């Protein structure tokens, strides 16, 4: 792949071996709530305490999990190959903690909170930010409640202009650990294909959009990605 522009899109599957639950494996439920019923603006309006509990649990869990060999392999590929745009649907910080420098979080991030008045986002991972109580901003004269800095169902994913710019112009498009359920992320492989890119999937099993890929490697990302990255780096 030497000299080629590469885009990598990751999903919950890449964090599975770190102990972060995926969305659609087994039941994809949280305390018997469907994610689709918790991660929405309406849920936040109707039951902010329940939504806050859901995200505080996931924000606190981030302290207990570590990057796995798949995160490390992608960071190595970014360093060695040089022309890699990394986009993730994940809201954890495991790519960064695995050594990846620039990561485009299209569905937001757990480690930041967003002021509901100014819409400004800040890293809020100190002890006082991780309690069951709502967190107030320090950016407004009259402190406002802060919301999870997450793209909820029905909201627009972030950085889509940058993402389409990268996908439109890439030579190789690689997806790791995503079920191809949620658009626009699930449709990026088709955009890449239409622009003539080589498309590669690394996933535990064949997802819904498997037939959109030129190459499919099934298995656990933490187990098969390190060897694949070595192959890609050796390719001319
Ligand atoms: N290695 C590789 N793939 C794995 C592993 C693993 N160890 N474990 C699970 N997988 C695969 C599953 O087979 C599944 O196809 O990862 C995929 C995870 O799919 P989802 O749980 O649907 O996660 P994702 O595709 O990231 O969901 C997209 O949906 O709920 C929204 O915003 C949320 O970003 C999320 C989006």
Image (cartoon, rainbow, N blue to C red):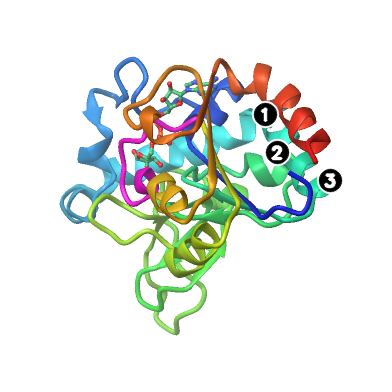
Outermost bottom residue:
141
Part of the protein shown in magenta: 177-187
**In the image, is 39 to the left or to the right of 71?**
left
Residue placed most toward the observer, 15 or 193: 193
186 within the magenta span: yes
Residue 206 location, x and y as percent? 41, 20
- Mark 2 = which residue? 74
Q: Locate the C terminus and report the quarter of the image it occupies.
A: top right
- Residue 91 horizontal side relative to residue 6, left or right: left
Q: Quadrant of residue 186?
A: top left
Give the image quadrant in which the ligand numbered 1 is located. top left
- Above or below, 39 against 159 in this view is above
Q: Nearer the viewer, residue 26 or 70?
A: 70
The tag on residue 146 is: none
Determine which residue is flagged by label 1: 70
Residue 205, visible in the rendered structure: yes
Q: Is residue 176 left or right of residue 39?
A: right
The residue at 50%/78% (across/down) is 139
Q: Are marks 2 and 1 in contact (CB under 8 Å)?
A: yes
Answer yes or no: disc 1 within 8 Å of ligand 1: yes
SS at badge 2: helix
Q: Position of residue 49 (x, y in %)?
A: 28, 46
Q: CA distance from mark 2 to mark 3?
A: 10 Å
């Amino acid at each position: 792949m030497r000299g080629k522009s590469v885009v990598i899109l990751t999903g919950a599957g890449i964090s599975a071996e770190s102990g972060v639950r995926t969305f659609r494996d087994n039941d994809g439920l949280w305390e018997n709530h469907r994610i689709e019923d918790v991660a929405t603006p309406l849920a936040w309006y109707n039951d902010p305490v329940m939504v806050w509990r859901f995200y505080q649990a996931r924000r606190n869990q981030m302290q207990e999990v570590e990057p796995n060999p798949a995160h490390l392999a992608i960071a190595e590929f970014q360093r060695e190959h040089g022309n890699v745009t990394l986009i993730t649907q994940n809201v954890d910080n495991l790519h960064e903690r695995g050594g990846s420098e620039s990561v485009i979080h299209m569905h937001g991030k757990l480690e930041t909170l967003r002021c509901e008045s100014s819409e400004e986002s800040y890293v809020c991972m100190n002890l006082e930010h991780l309690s069951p109580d709502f967190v107030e901003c320090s950016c407004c004269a009259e402190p406002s409640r802060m919301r999870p800095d997450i793209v909820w169902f029905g909201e627009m994913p972030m950085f889509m202009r940058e993402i389409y710019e990268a996908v439109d112009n890439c030579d190789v498009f690689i997806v790791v650990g995503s079920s191809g359920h949620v658009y626009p992320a699930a449709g990026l492989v088709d955009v890449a294909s239409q622009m003539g890119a080589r498309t590669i999937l690394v996933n535990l099993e064949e997802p819904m959009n498997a037939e959109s890929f030129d190459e499919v490697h099934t298995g656990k990302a933490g187990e098969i990605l390190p060897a694949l990255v070595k192959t890609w780096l050796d390719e001319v």
